Amino acid sequence: MANTVIGLFEDADDAQEAVRKLVEKGFGRDDIDITASGNYAGTGSDAGRGDSHESFGDKVGNFFSSLFGDDADEAGRHTEVLRHGGTLVTVHAVSGDRAETAADILDECGAIDVDERSAQYRGAAQGAGRQDYDRTDRTREAAIPVVEEQLEVGKREVERGGVRVRSRVVERPVQEELRLREEHVNVERRPVDRPATEADLNRVREGTFEVTERAEQAVVNKEARVVEEVAIGKEVQERTETVRDTLRKTEVDVEEVKGDAKTRGKGTGR
């Protein structure tokens, strides 16, 4: 029940418009319930016995009790307002964000303020009872309730967007020029015709003479270095916003009404 949003509409067309906008915003039609207050009346064995109003109270009261849990006052206010008629739209949202979206749509389409309407109904009922008592049992005075709206301004936190930071690994080809040295052994036979010296005679023996070739090769090594840091933070600013609205108040004007000053006498017949 934590993500269930309800809206009560006086006009059934406004309720249908709210359902249409909810569907446009991606809410599934199976997640939206729309019920007119007349659908809560007694049916079957209850109908025709005069207890449909009691069946209404049971069904609506049980529904709002399951919705609001231990908050019996809130459930009672919603039950009282729906008792006077209207169409109830119930939205089952999958998350808190989607629940806030549904609540905004219901408000835009004209969902009534249940607390304010409940206070009006109770004030009217108390005023009516006091008026009947004054007229019949005491000095026949009429009591006119003076109703004044009061502005209540609150705050709620909403998401306005943000920044998504994603890191990924990319590859790029690189090249570097490097001069390498290689050795190559050259064997060359040259014809010689000269008398052998003593040194030449000393070299006349069996043996092996090796000459090794050497070459340089490129050696590649990679080192990872941190070249930049991306810092993410939030800056909190406060601003003053002026909320403007119109409040209604009942004003009672008292005007003195003067009576007829002429005197009328009764004639005597003969």
Image (cartoon, grey):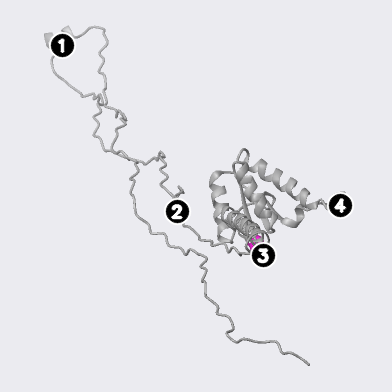
Give the spatial CA distance, label 1 vs label 3. Answer: 124 Å
* Residue that carries the numbered disc 2 in the rendered image: 153
Mark 4 near mark 3, Cβ–Cβ under 8 Å?
no
Check residue 15 for magenta coloring. yes
Q: Which of the two labelled residues, at mark 2 and mark 4, occupies the earlier sequence position?
A: 4
Q: Nearer the viewer, mark 4 or mark 3?
A: 4
Q: Residue at x 59, y 61 (%)?
A: 109
In this rendered view, identify the residue nearer to me: 88 or 28: 88
Crowd tier of the residue under label 3, counting other residues whose Cα lies within 10 Å: few below 14, some 14–19, many 20 or above = few
- Determine which residue is flagged by label 4: 49
Q: Is residue 236 magenta?
A: no
Q: Residue at x 26, y 38 (%)?
A: 177
Q: Amino acid at mark 2?
A: Val
Mark 1 → mark 2, Cα distance in angstroms: 117 Å
Looking at the image, residue 5 sits to the left or right of residue 42; the answer is: left
The mark nearer the N terminus, 4 or 1, is 4
- Which amino acid type corresponds to the residue marked 3 in the rendered image? Asp
Dot 1: what SS? helix
In the rendered image, residue 244, in percent from the top left (x then y), is placed at: 43, 62
| Residue identifier under label 1 | 200
Q: Say which label, 1 or 2, has the lower sequence index.
A: 2
Q: Residue furthest bottom?
A: 270
Disc 3 target residue: 13
